[in-house]
Amino acid sequence: MVGAEGRVASAIAPGPDVLVSWLEKMIEIRLAEDKVMEIYMQGLVPGTVHLCQGMEGTSVGACGALTPDDWVVCTYRGHHHALSRGVDLVGFFAEIMGRENGVCGGMGGSSHIVDRSLGMLGSPAIIGAGIPVATGAGLSAKLRGEQRVAVGFFGDGACNIGTFHEALNMAQLWRSQVVFVVENNQYGEYTPYRDSTALADGGNIADRAGAYGMASAVVDGQDARAVYEAVSLARARALAGEGPTLIEAQTYRYRGHSRTDPGAYRPPGELDAWKQRDPIGILGDFLITEGALAASGLETMWERTQVAVDEAADVAAEGGWPTIQQAEGFVYAE
């Protein structure tokens, strides 16, 4: 990573056991979203869903760089953030199905899976709304002298919203202990980001940090280890009082923007090309090459995780429906 002052740093690489756990988590996310689509088609999911398959490397790598005390603010496309942060599978599926045994009591649904006990502060459905929340959380940590940071996840489309620029400006001005992670999945809904984002020729979204004197990095979002390194360094900078960092993780979503989007706007061959660099495949191949995992072990991991996902969804579906009285309890704070 190159900081605002032009310095270059490095991070300590995670060990084989940690990387194996990351691989299993990415497989869990992939299979959990397959299950989400299955129960959606069965009519068990109120509303719509926004899936993140193909983007697992960004969330797992970033969350792998955090401590339990750190905060996370994500978006409505946040299944991978929630599971990467450690949300229970049963509570995950129950929330998506609107059941009272969900992590938010069935009040949030697919777009709002958060767990305060895991440092998840929210997942706003309004584009860019979480960026100033992360900025404020990071500032509160600084003012309290706490060794924690806030990480704000958002998509490329949010980088054209006023709150993006306002939050970056104030975060740098205040030296907030925040790390901004742009998950550039190449499309803002149905529009390629370069068709809606003014950048210098060949430039990147991360370049916008330069206007505020902020450190930045562009990383391969398909490589969880690369994301981990960038977030680790950004976290260290923030805790050292050197200010925030804008990280652009270049990734891709395999499915459409939402359930009703067939993705017909993609150029021929684009999806297949990105799948050649699947984040699960990249990390799995690395671990097998390094001798940290056998091919048979990887197959077993898929099978074991599929069983866990199926069982969790079945248990979640047995939950009851929240009542009007329970809903009223979320309207006002005591």
Image (cartoon, rainbow, N blue to C red):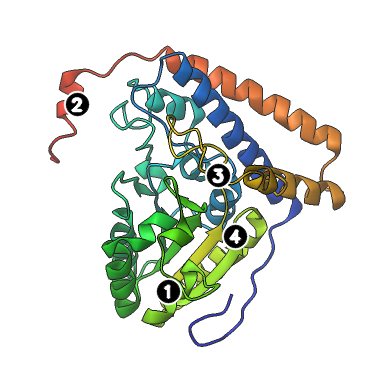
Q: Secondary structure at mark 1?
A: helix
Q: On residue 327, which mark appears?
A: 2
Camera sees residue 17: no
In space, the residues marked 1 and 4 are separated at their CA atoms by 19 Å
Q: Secondary structure at mark 2?
A: helix
Camera sees residue 118: yes
Q: Secondary structure at mark 4?
A: helix
**Mark toward the viewer: 2 or 3:** 3
Relative image position of residue 236 (x, y in whole percent): 51, 72
Q: Is residue 131 above or below residue 171?
A: above
Q: Secondary structure at mark 3?
A: loop
Residue under label 3, please give it: 266
Q: Amino acid at mark 3?
A: Arg
Q: Is residue 298 above or below residue 15?
A: above
Of mark 1 and mark 4, the one earlier in the sequence is 1
Of mark 2 and mark 1, the one earlier in the sequence is 1
Q: Residue at x 42, y 31 (%)?
A: 49
Q: Amino acid at mark 1?
A: Arg
In space, the residues marked 1 and 3 are separated at their CA atoms by 26 Å
Relative image position of residue 194 (x, y in whole percent): 47, 61
The reply, left or right, for residue 234 in relation to residue 328 is right
Of mark 2 and mark 3, the one earlier in the sequence is 3
